[in-house]
Image (cartoon, rainbow, N blue to C red):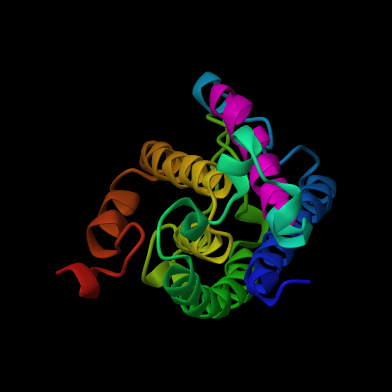
């Protein structure tokens, strides 16, 4: 394997572990609570979002694996070249750009691994309140300890960092597109979940929102 593709392989492994464990959690939690943990949300907007979201995640995973393991010479022309060619091959000065990307990718690899580990910590803290979508008829416990003392959506914040890392680790058009879609949908979903939680917990959640940042601790943004 080309050593320059190792970061892409790390990204593919990290995100595959992430989503593989999501599937395991869905099955385990469904057995505990006696219902699907909202993989298909019980409201229309969430259902529509999943029509785009789930295929996008599959495409992101597939593109990371393809970028990591397919030999560069196999993708030489046409749309496939545009989608999978490293960014530095689309412009002038190949070697300097390639070296810069490799240095950045090495740092992103560390962040991606740490993000995967941190996500497991957040999942554990969520316990039985973890869901993958909204059910308007369900009232979940408000988790505000551990990482949730500092940010309202630590799992989403970490995944957005991992999306950015994925682009740096596998710098090509298709990874940029699919990671950007996931990043945008996370922004939308976080706000939708906040409206849902405030409708269920009222003033308690409103006060929590005022004291805790959405994706970044309040102390960092003033």
Q: Nearer the viewer, residue 134 or 198?
A: 134
Q: Residue furthest top?
A: 44
Q: Estimate the x, y position of residue 144 in percent, counting from the top left.
A: 44, 65
Can residue 142 be seen in this snapshot?
Answer: no
Q: Which residue is located at x 69 percent, y 50 percent?
A: 61
The quarter of the rendered structure image containing the C terminus is: bottom left
In the picture, measured across the screen, residue 149 lies left or right of residue 69, that is left
Q: Which quadrant does the N terminus fall into?
A: bottom right
In the foreground, 92 or 123: 92
- 141 left or right of 55 in image: left
**Magenta segment:** 47-66
Give residue 85's position: percent from left, percent from top: 59, 51
Above/below status of 115 relative to 192 = below
Q: Is residue 25 magenta?
A: no
Does the rendering let one see residue 4? yes
Residue 56: in magenta span? yes
Residue drawn where x is 47% and y is 70% of the image: 101
Could you tell me which residue is drawn at 56 percent across and 80 percent down? 110
Residue at image coords 46%, 47%? 183
Q: Using the rendered view, name the quadrant where residue 73 is placed.
A: bottom right
């Amino acid at each position: 394997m080309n050593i320059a593709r190792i970061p892409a392989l790390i990204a593919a492994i990290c995100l595959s572990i992430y989503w593989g464990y999501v599937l395991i959690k869905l099955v385990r939690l469904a057995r505990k609570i006696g219902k699907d943990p909202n993989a298909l949300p019980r409201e229309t907007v969430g259902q529509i979002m999943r029509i785009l979201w789930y295929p996008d995640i599959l495409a992101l995973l597939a593109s990371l694996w393809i970028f990591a393991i397919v030999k560069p010479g196999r993708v030489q022309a046409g749309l496939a070249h545009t989608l999978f060619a490293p960014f530095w091959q689309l412009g002038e000065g190949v070697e300097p750009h390639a070296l810069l990307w490799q240095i950045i990718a090495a740092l992103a690899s560390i962040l991606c691994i740490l993000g995967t580990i941190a996500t497991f910590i957040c999942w554990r803290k969520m316990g039985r309140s973890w869901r993958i979508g909204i059910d308007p008829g369900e009232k979940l416990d408000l988790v505000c300890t551990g990482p949730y003392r500092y940010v309202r959506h630590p799992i989403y914040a970490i995944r957005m960092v991992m999306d950015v890392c994925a682009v740096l680790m596998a710098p090509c058009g298709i990874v940029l597109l699919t990671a950007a879609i996931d990043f945008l949908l996370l922004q939308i979903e976080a706000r939708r979940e906040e409206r849902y939680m405030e409708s269920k917990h009222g003033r308690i959640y409103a006060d929590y929102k005022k004291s805790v940042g959405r994706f970044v601790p309040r102390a960092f943004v003033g």
